[in-house]
């Protein structure tokens, strides 16, 4: 029977046994980084890309993970194999590790490596067939001169504040702008629009998470003959878009049909979004690191 397996610093645990110290700075200060990775059909999707991004995040916060990327990949494969899941979700966490009650990261001797392989909770299927109604939220995405959102850090309160606004408004998601009003991303997904048959997504230099799904969609769309631009967009561009969709490892490709009360297209998932969704699903089912 497939089951949840959790790797912590060299040992495997089940869900009830897996524990970390309350002095871990990942808990005390959100001092750490993470990844969210999918397993489809017994293959880990874009594993190397996720590990590369993990090590970039680590470098940015001056955290020495202490093992090579190759060893990290082996840990992921071992954890996934041990779980027995053929379709699942991997959550990787690197925390600063156990320290004292002050914030100084130098007081933590070594980081903790945690790899959770568990089932994925998907959005309800009707969200994919009907599309999401979203709002733009007042909480601004961190600017690049603050803590760069390209770091996938354990401190997600910027995103969570945006998600709370979306929840309070009864919206399916919140789209976050930066300090000058440019669209950045949703609280846990990247944003795309279609306008006059051109697919547009905000550029990475705005300070967004460089989504693995975002890049996969850009590549697949181009391969299939679509024009894709990485360009700054505003709320106005969202309102007048022909189509809009969000991408993420968890969400995959999900259509947006209403933004701040403005109906997008005819209010149902558009043909290009549907096509990209189908291309994406076929691609993920057939590519990845074999288990
Ligand atoms: N933006 C944010 C803020 C995220 O947390 C995520 C991941 N859930 C994404 C975008 C999408 O990234 P990916 O495609 O790599 O999952």
Image: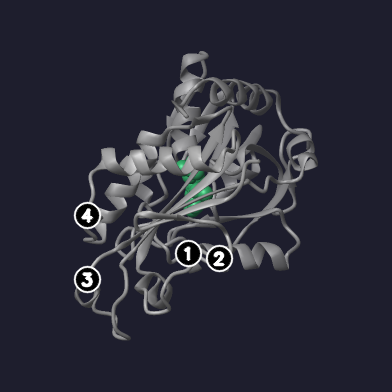
Instruction: Measuring from the top left, give residue 200's x and y in whole percent.
Output: 50, 33
* Above or below: residue 74 compared with residue 117: above
Instruction: Measuring from the top left, give residue 137's x and y in whole percent.
Output: 59, 62
Instruction: Measuring from the top left, give residue 160's x and y in whole percent.
Output: 55, 65
- Would you name the residue on which mark 3 appears? 109
10 Å neighbourhood of mark 3: few (<14), some, or many (≥20)? few
Work out how far the residue at label 4 is from the one at label 3, CA to CA, in angstroms.
11 Å
Specify which label sits upstream in the sequence, 4 or 3: 4
Specify which label sits upstream in the sequence, 2 or 3: 3
Instruction: Measuring from the top left, give residue 251's x and y in whole percent.
Output: 61, 42
The residue furthest bottom is 101
- Would you name the residue on which mark 1 appears? 156
**SS label for mark 2:** helix
Task: Residue 203: name its quadrant.
Answer: top left
Work out how far the residue at label 1 is from the one at label 4, CA to CA, in angstroms.
24 Å
Mark 2 touching mark 1, by CB under 8 A?
A: yes
Work out how far the residue at label 1 is from the one at label 3, CA to CA, in angstroms.
24 Å
């Amino acid at each position: 029977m497939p089951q949840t397996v959790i790797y912590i610093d060299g040992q495997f645990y089940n869900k009830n046994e897996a524990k970390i110290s309350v002095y871990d700075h990942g808990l005390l200060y959100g001092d750490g980084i993470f990844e969210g990775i999918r397993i489809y059909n017994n293959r880990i999707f874009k594993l190397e890309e996720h590990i590369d991004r993990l090590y970039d995040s680590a470098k940015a916060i001056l955290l020495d993970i202490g093992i090579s990327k190759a060893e990290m990949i082996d840990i992921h494969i071992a954890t996934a194999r041990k779980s027995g899941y053929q379709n699942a979700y991997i959550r990787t966490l690197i925390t600063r590790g156990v320290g004292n009650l002050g914030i100084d990261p130098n007081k933590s001797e070594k980081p903790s490596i945690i790899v959770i392989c568990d089932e994925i909770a998907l959005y309800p299927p009707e969200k994919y067939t009907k599309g999401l109604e979203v709002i733009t939220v007042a909480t601004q995405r961190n600017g690049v001169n603050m803590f760069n959102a390209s770091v996938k850090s354990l401190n997600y309160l910027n995103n969570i504040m945006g998600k709370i606004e979306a929840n309070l408004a009864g919206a399916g998601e919140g789209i976050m702008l930066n300090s000058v009003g440019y669209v950045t991303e949703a609280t846990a997904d990247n944003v795309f629009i279609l306008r006059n048959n051109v697919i547009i997504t905000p550029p990475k230099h705005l300070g967004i998470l460089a989504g693995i799904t975002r890049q996969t969609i850009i590549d697949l769309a181009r391969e299939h003959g679509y024009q894709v631009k990485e360009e700054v967009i505003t709320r106005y561009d969202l309102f007048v878009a022909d189509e809009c969709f969000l991408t993420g490892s968890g969400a995959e490709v999900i259509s947006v049909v209403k933004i701040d009360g403005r109906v997008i297209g005819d209010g149902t998932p558009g043909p290009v979004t549907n096509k990209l969704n189908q291309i994406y699903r076929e691609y993920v089912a057939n590519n990845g690191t074999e288990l």
